[in-house]
Image (spheres, rainbow, N blue to C red):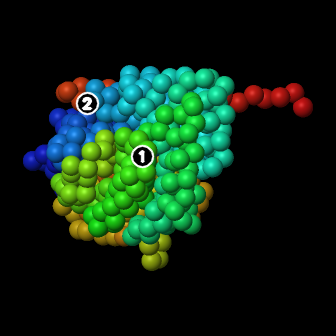
Amino acid sequence: MHFKGFKYNSNNELYCEHVSLNEVGEQYKTPLYVYSGESIVSSYKNLERSLSNTKTEIQFALKANSTLGILSLLSRLGSGADIVSGGELKKALYVNIPPSKIVFSGVGKTEEEIKLAINNGIKQINAESYPEIEKIIEISKEFKTKVPVAIRVNPDIDVKTHEKIATGSSQTKFGLPMEEAVEIYKKLANEKYIKTMGLAIHIGSQIFDMNEFKLAYKSILSLANNLRELGYTVPNLDLGGGLGVNYHNGLINFSDYGETIYNVFNNQGFNLSVEPGRSIVANSGILLTKIIFIKETNNKKFIVVDGAMNDFIRPTLYNAHHNIEPVNISNKPIQKYDVVGPICETGDIFIKNLKLGKPKEGQLLSIFSAGAYGSVMSSNYNSRPPAGEIIIFDKKIHVLKRQETLDDQIKKENLPTL
């Protein structure tokens, strides 16, 4: 395995750093997200090192994982934040990420959220539509203060990724057309209470082909240089995120990613930033789940676990592959099983035809690469409390989020007198 922070000991028992996952399963209720702090630090520093030649700022994308304890660790490492909601802004500020390192992206910012961003003095708002720009201008005049605005452009580039996470095509809801960017930038530059901050781009997630990044980067560089030739100030280029994570083996190509950015932007005179999410935290977390039943039919064998699609929806939503390993490796004959959850949906399935030595009820399984788009996308479907979360760091277990109880769920609602 190439999942730093997780390894088997000589007795074929899986550990997260120095801690037995069997002991974790006994002490804390499953399903449970378990994060390796060592792995998060390592991923962040590997990315930082790959960008050192260009001194590119890192703004972690909170949409990948917004658990406060994770964000606090990243804040200590020096990370900024890429946010897409007022809630994410408040979380970033709560863990002491400096406002000067916070970028607000997203297509549907409300008036309340825009005002919240302005009042907190964040680095910039990445505007994505004409109505949003008009609303920001209107609010800036009301506040009579300079509002830092960049425009997110859409380069109309189709990338080789899942259609639901491709964002650089003109058929998606993101960004403004490249061919209209000069006129839009000119309009912003002429506004008394707008500070033009540059351009932003993001073409999608799970991108492995560096040529796709290069094409997008050259496109935004050409536009930025054109704007400068016309006399406009273009200080920053926000390059988005999207670096792919190989969920089969855990490998991430930080070095080629950094080299691509260097080759395109070296000596061009722009301040650069990137918005990684998945590449920092995906491999740093697992979902620990317990086997409830082994169900066998005439032609299928099922492992029914206590984790479900409400805890971790990626396999259902994207047909995503995630390695699943037993916490204790068995030497018994290998058989094939479908690993499924208890939710009343056929789609509540984690993996098909998993090869395992004969499993048994009560045994623990680990679903790997669950640190990104895991807990942050959880729900209460089927009135199920989503998984709790812990992190193992500096030789200690830290509870990040306890699992809700059914009573907690009921207390959130009001029972009217009808």
Q: Decide which of 98, 123 is in the foreground and name it.
A: 123
Q: In whole angstroms, how far apart are the C-alphas of marks 2 and 1?
A: 37 Å
- 415 on left or right of 136: right
Query: Quarter holding the C terminus?
Result: top right
Q: Which residue is identified by label 1? A: 231
Query: Is residue 147 in view?
Result: yes
Q: Is residue 106 left or right of residue 251?
A: right
Mark 2 and mark 1 in contact? Answer it, CB < 8 Å.
no
Give the amino acid at mark 2. Leu
Task: Name the residue rendered at 32%, 28% in the picture.
Answer: 75
In terms of sequence position, does the residue under pointer 2 or pointer 1 come before the other? 2
Q: Is residue 349 visible?
A: no
Residue 1 is marked as: none
Q: Secondary structure at mark 1?
A: loop
- Mark 1: few/some/many CA within 10 Å (<14, 14-19, 20+): few
Task: Report the label total.
Answer: 2
Residue nearest the observer in this picture, 343 or 154: 154
Seen from the viewer's position, the closer of residues 213 and 222 is: 222
In the picture shown, does residue 86 fall above or below 238?
Answer: above
In the rendering, at what x and y percent does residue 316 appear? 50, 60
Rendered residue at 40%/35% (across/down)? 81
- Extreme left residue here? 10
Residue in front for this viewpoint, 174 or 10 = 174
